[in-house]
Image (cartoon, rainbow, N blue to C red):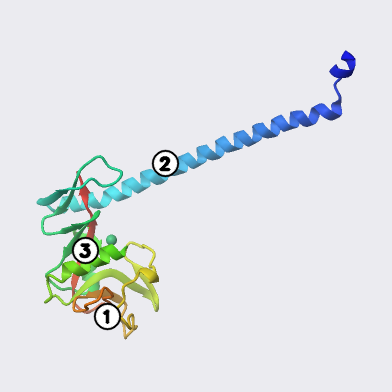
Amino acid sequence: MMNGQGRVHPGTAAPAEERRCSWLNIWVFLIFALAIKAAFLTICLVVLLWHSSEQPRALQQQFSEWKCDSAVPQGTDRGWMCCPEGWRRFQRSCYFLSLDQMNWAESEQSCTGMGSQLVVINSKAEQEFLSKQIKQYPQRENFYIGLFEVKEGQWQWVDKTLYNVTAAFWRKGEPNNGLDENCTVIHNLEKTLNNWIDIPSHNKHHRICEAAAVIV
Ligand code: CA
């Protein structure tokens, strides 16, 4: 009886061994995959933090007077968000509405020279905020924003944010792709929220610059 129970049958023992080995292989593979994923995420996070801290640093170097208000942004334990004096804050961004007028390339250079960029409109809330802000200066008719045409019909934001046609705020009938109309302004005389117009880049207009608010 013992012999019967204790006998090793080569045909039955080997698959059990193989099963253990294959389970071991799966675990090794899973741990290895998780380690790779963790390393990848760490690298992404470091690059992201390094990149996002670039802009505020640049902005901080440009201005000595700042206005801060109490607001605890999600994911931080610090409670002040600051913009340079004269700029306006909305959510995590600071905005500069220029008094002077320049062509599109000069406008973009002027913004980057201050550690910012021509505004990138990411949401309806941001569009509403900006449209309301510029209404305080009805004599300033057009403001350049950071949206331009790479080639006919292909629009791009200055920070490479994906252009989403469903979240665009073109005035009725725009963009009409007139001659050389490859840049965009917010038209202040438009009464609705759909106030973007495509316009030639050599025209001189006001501009809106945007930079990340500095959290302290
Ligand atoms: Ca924005």
Q: Which residue is the site of mark 2?
A: 42
Image quadrant holding the C terminus, namely top left
Determine which quarter of the picture holds residue 109: bottom left
Q: Residue at position x 19%, y 65% from top?
A: 110
Q: Is residue 210 above or below residue 41?
A: below
69 left or right, relative to 55: left
Label 3, residues with CA under 10 Å away: few <14, some 14-19, many ≥20: many
Q: Which residue is the site of mark 1?
A: 200
Kind of residue indicated by mark 3: Cys
**Looking at the picture, how far across and down is residue 87, in whole percent?**
14, 59
Label 2, residues with CA under 10 Å away: few <14, some 14-19, many ≥20: few
| Mark toward the viewer: 1 or 3 | 3
Q: Which residue is the site of mark 3?
A: 209
**Looking at the picture, how far across and down is residue 8, in whole percent?**
85, 21
Kind of residue indicated by mark 1: Pro
SS category of the residue bearing label 2: helix
* Marked residue nearer the N-terminal end (1 or 3): 1
Image quadrant of ligand 1 equals bottom left
Residues under numbered marks 1 and 2 in contact, where contact means CB atoms less than 8 Å apart = no
Residue 95 shows in this picture: yes
* Marked residue nearer the N-terminal end (3 or 2): 2
- Tell me the distance, in whole angstroms, between the alpha carbons under discs 1 and 2: 43 Å
Mark 2 C-beta to ligand 1 under 8 Å: no
- Tell me the distance, in whole angstroms, between the alpha carbons under discs 1 and 3: 19 Å
65 left or right, relative to 93: left
